[in-house]
Amino acid sequence: MEWPGKIRICVGSYILRQQLKKRKRNPAVCNLAEAKKIGIIYNATELAGFEIIRDLAKRISDHDVTVSILGYVHSKNLVDQYLYRKDFDFFHKGNLNWYDKPCSEITDKFMNEPFDILINLSLEDYYPIQYITALSPARFKAGRYSSEDTALDLMIDIEKEKARMKKLQSEISSGQMQKSNDRKPDPGMTKRTDTELQLNFLINQLMHYLMIINKNNP
């Protein structure tokens, strides 16, 4: 990494630590049965996860829960595919300052919303998503385990499952190749399948624990 990038990361990390010192949050265990307002934030750069996130939001909202969804697109602009996604809000690199802090009305509103549960479904570490997650006043925060993210109250380690998912991905790809009689793998399909497998696994694990977790036995 070139030195401008290193400086940006160092400055961003320092400012986030300073912001966290100023914010007071009273974390409390909250399960799905108790939650009335849930926020979902995720990396929306690849469209592969949209249907999965939409289905999850529908499952949750069917239980009289208000769901807010915010996606981060790692691009300078939003293409048309993002502009007509009902009930989804998005932000992109054009909404970040020079050290990648989110700066928009949409991100500010989401970041300051007192969710009962905030779910971070990003499969990778992105500072803008980490910034919003860390500074959110949500009662309970859940997501993928990352050594760089200390803001979550419930974390699911998907690294241990990647080998199994890779094998399953290979089997799915082989089946698709046989159907199409195409010996050359489609990189786009492989990437999409990998993302979908990991995202589904993370969601299933999070939903399982968020349903059974008890505030008297965290």
Image: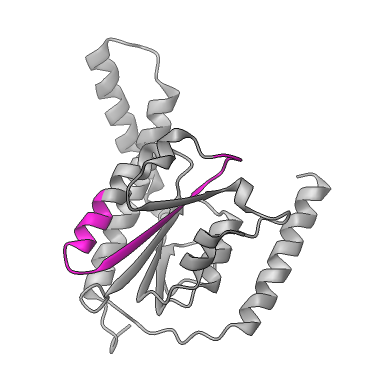
Query: For the magenta stretch, what is the residue range?
Result: 55-77
Of residue 185 and residue 112, the one placed in the foreground of this image is 112
What is the x, y in percent for residue 13? 69, 66
Q: Where is the C terminus found, in terms of image quarters?
A: bottom left
Name the colouring of the figure.
one colour
Q: Residue furthest right?
A: 3
For the point 27% across and 75% down, the residue is 36
Q: Is residue 86 magenta?
A: no
For the point 22% across and 62% down, the residue is 61
Displayed quadrant of residue 58: bottom left
For the point 75% across and 62% down, the residue is 10
Q: Is residue 64 magenta?
A: yes
Displayed quadrant of residue 125: bottom right
Up the image or down, 156 lies above or below 168; here it is below
- Whether residue 155 is visible, yes or no, is no
What is the x, y in percent for residue 71? 45, 51
Of residue 170 and residue 41, the one placed in the foreground of this image is 41
Displayed quadrant of residue 185: top left
Of residue 3 and residue 160, the one placed in the foreground of this image is 3
What is the x, y in percent for residue 174? 29, 23
What is the x, y in percent for residue 14? 73, 69
- Whether residue 149 is visible, yes or no, is yes
Q: Is residue 85 left or right of residue 63?
A: right
Q: Residue furthest bottom?
A: 216
- In this rendering, the count of numbered labels is 0
Q: Where is the N terminus found, in terms of image quarters?
A: top right
